[in-house]
Amino acid sequence: MSMLSMISVVDDDELVREATDNLLSSEGYLVHTFASAEEFLQSPQVNDCACVVADVQMTGMSGVDLLIHMRAQGHSTPFVFITAFPEDRVRDQARKAGAIGFLAKPFTAPDLIKHVEAAIGGGDAG
């Protein structure tokens, strides 16, 4: 029996969190959702998840700041970013920090799945 991959979804938009949770759960992933980067950092999932799907722009710590913080703490967890503001500057900042994928909202279910699978498999979905 294969172990379920645990995905942490970090987004301050409840509807996006729920939709992303439902989509990833329907694909067989174990999903934990967090309303903020700070909430995620205080959870046990910070050490256990196979991938983080995070919004770039959130109240408090941004998704990119979360990634930078986690790398500074020695975590190599892959990140896939989702954003309503897909600016090149933000995309470049996310990539430089080590993001695996970067999706503009609204994104399609297959696109998100492709990015998460690439992140967990150690690839790069673009």
Image (cartoon, helix red, strand yellow):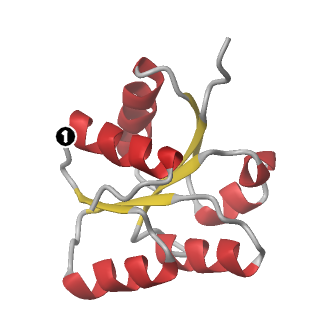
Residue appearing at x 20%, y 80% in the figure: 87
* Residue at image location 67% in from the left, 76% down from the top: 71
Q: Quadrant of residue 83?
A: bottom left
**Apparent side of residue 33 relative to residue 102 in the rendered image (left or right):** right
Q: Is residue 109 left or right of residue 80?
A: left
Q: Image height check: is 36 above or below 95? A: above
Residue located 78% across and 58% down the image: 42
- Seen in the picture, residue 2 relative to 63 is either above or below; the reply is above
Residue furthest to the top: 1
Q: Dot 1: within a 10 Å radius of its alpha carbon, few (fewer than 14), some, or many (20 or more) residues?
A: few
The three-letter amino acid code for the residue at tag 1 is Thr
To which quarter of the image does residue 90 belong?
Answer: bottom left
On-image quarter of the C terminus: bottom left
Is 61 situated left or right of 95 in this image?
Answer: right
| Residue linked to disc 1 | 108
- Locate residue 50, reporting x and y percent: 62, 45
In the rendered image, residue 95, in percent from the top left (x then y), is placed at 39, 77
Q: Quadrant of the N terminus?
A: top right
Q: How many numbered badges does the structure rendering display?
A: 1
Choose between 68 and 115: the one closer to the eye: 115
Which residue occupies the foreground of this view, 32 or 2?
Answer: 2
Look at the image and tell me whether residue 34 can be seen: no
Residue drawn at (81%, 47%), measured in percent from left and top? Answer: 44
Residue 101's spot in the image, x, y percent?
Answer: 35, 61
Residue 25's place in the image compared with 38, above or below, is above
Work out whether residue 12 can be spotted. yes
In front: 22, or 47? 47
Q: Is residue 17 left or right of residue 4?
A: left
Q: Which type of secondary structure does the marked residue at label 1 adopt? A: loop
Position in image of residue 46 (x %, y %): 73, 54
